[in-house]
Amino acid sequence: MAKVTEVEGKAVNHGEINKIVAAKTGYSQNIVSEVTSEFVHVISDNIVDGKDVVIRNLISFNTIDKGPCKGRNPRTGEEIDVPAKNVVKAKVSKSLQKKVNPEK
């Protein structure tokens, strides 16, 4: 198995995730890339369909309907009508939150 190198910077992108998973599993980066891409598509498609997506011990996604409201243009101060829309909400699991903020 190949050695997993440190990721530079603060953000880990899709390509870096593919490299890490490929190195840890021994699968090629092409196969891992196809799987991770399909994983993202399945999650996205279910969210678009209005279904909740729960990945235990990681994160959950759901959509909520936000009704129309009044807004204000910050430059002119003019009041505008903001139309109704659907919003995606994400909630991190308690177990991940505890890993990020361990009790001392």
Image (cartoon, rainbow, N blue to C red):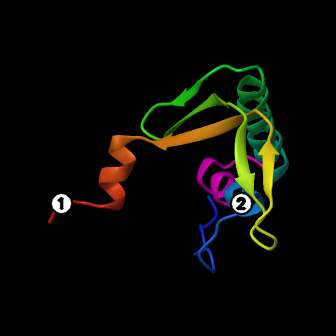
Disc 2 to disc 1, C-alpha distance? 32 Å
The amino acid type found where label 1 is placed reads Glu
Label 2 or label 1, whichever comes before in sequence order? 2
- Under tag 2, what secondary structure? helix
Q: In the image, which residues are magenta?
A: 20-28
Helix, strand or loop status at disc 1: loop
* Quarter of image, res 79: bottom right
Characterize the local packing of mark 2: few (<14), some (14-19) or many (20 or more) Cα atoms within 10 angstroms.
Answer: some
Is the magenta region chiefly helix, strand or loop? Answer: helix
Q: Is residue 42 above or below residue 94?
A: above
How many numbered tags mark residues here?
2
Q: In this rendering, which labeled residue sits more in front, label 2 or label 1?
A: 1
Q: Place residue 81 in its image quadrant.
A: top right
* Rendered position, 63 above or below 88: above
Report which residue position mark 1 lands on.
103
84 left or right, relative to 104:
right
Question: Quadrant where the N terminus lies?
Answer: bottom right
Residue at mark 2: 19
Q: Position of residue 75 (x, y in %)?
A: 80, 74
